Image (tube, helix red, strand yellow):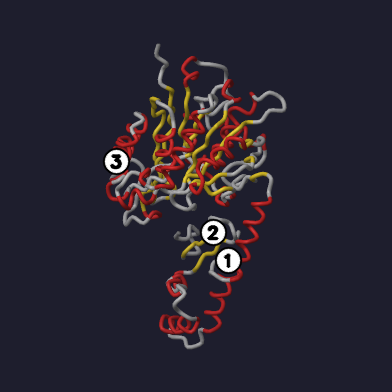
Amino acid sequence: MPSPVADRPGLLIRDPFRYTDATLIIPPLLARLLALFDGQHSELDLRAALTQMTGDLQTGELAKHLVDTLDDNGFLQSPTFEAMREKRHKEFAEATERMPAHAGSAYPDEAEALRATLAGYGAPAAEAGDPAEARLLGIAAPHVSPEGGYQSYAAAYRRLRAEHADKTFVILGTSHYGEPETFGLTRKAYLTPLGPVETDVAFVDELAQRAGASVAMEDFCHSSEHSIEFQSVFLQGRLGPHLPEGERLRAVPILCGALAESLWTGKPPETNDKARRFFEALAETASQRDDVIWVLGVDMAHIGRRYGDNFDAITEKGVMADVRRRDEERLERLCAGDSEGFFELMRPKSDDLRWCGYGPMYTFLQCASTFTGRMLNYEQWNIDPKSVVTFVGAEMLRAPETT
């Protein structure tokens, strides 16, 4: 993305998989040369392009510096990168727990500071019962940085009560970098500064057996993905104090890959064999449990310069007023449990609103029992001065039992 550092313009590049921890800012002149790193051009071509751009014949040292900097930091497809990737995958595979990747940056990494931050967000410790909460089927919360989406996080997590602490939370998070139409599972507990969220291994193993090739087991994307990590933190903050001594929160963390084929073809996601098999497997596995609460870690529209638009986006102004209208139309279909109507609103223009929560939301619609939903808080946030992300806090209640 464009460099956010005022006195260092250029292109900022980083690796979302964290094979490398480096973040580089490539100056504007050199950023224009990155198109040559395509497997078709040589370093000689790079030097020739530099000479043409600068008028200087002595470009060999600068070209070598650019190549070496990219390679040493893991940004070229090379033996250096392959070694970094292999090392990271091995470390994750051998780990017994999933370490918090965003503690100390997106939220405090010390327990007391984190508790104070969550309290400041308006998400106090849970209290006991409310008759409506007996029918709570699930919540939807953002996965944007908590500082930007705290009102929607708080609105959703306030629906959880003390008596929910012993439930199993099926967390459907967006997999921003995983393989499309694939669902990432792990048996590892998600550690947080407030304590671990234990993975229900029996549930995961049963789901993996049913879903077959639809799942990536011990998916490396779990190692750095924030969409489930942030939900784990809020679950701990809300319900951790109500656990009996020695007990842990239980969850089934599922990363939902993009349902990209459906947006290319205009056909519902379940026409893809892998997606359909997973939906059927998750629906069957969840239906055999009476303690499941769903948690959707989802953002919605991504509008503005950062996301490829040729205009500045400002919350609730200009084009964002129409984005709100379209967001709310889709949310109405979600809350009505209408997967067909929801998809019909996603399909046009291959989702020009860029809802990254599409995968988890549609998965929930395909797998959950009958429910009614309610929007609790809708927000638009300028993630930078020219770009906006939208998100929601929502609840889903089981349909009342009839006699």
Residue on which disc 2 sits: 15
- The span from disc 3 to disc 2 (Cα, nearest Å) is 32 Å
In the image, is residue 13 above or below residue 63?
above
Kind of residue at disc 2: Asp
Q: Nearer the viewer, residue 348 or 230?
A: 348
> In which image quadrant can residue 316 be found?
top left
Which x, y percent locates residue 295? 50, 33
Q: Nearer the viewer, residue 150 or 142?
A: 142
- The span from disc 3 to disc 1 (Cα, nearest Å) is 40 Å
Which x, y percent locates residue 378? 39, 34
Instruction: Choose the circle earlier in sequence order: 3 or 2.
Output: 2
Would residue 80 appear left or right of 264 to someone viewing this image?
Answer: right
Kind of residue at disc 1: Gly
Q: Indicate the secondary structure of the residue bearing disc 3.
A: helix
Q: Indicate the secondary structure of the residue bearing disc 2.
A: loop
Q: Residue at x 54, y 75 (%)?
A: 67
Which x, y percent locates residue 164? 56, 23
Residue on which disc 1 sits: 74
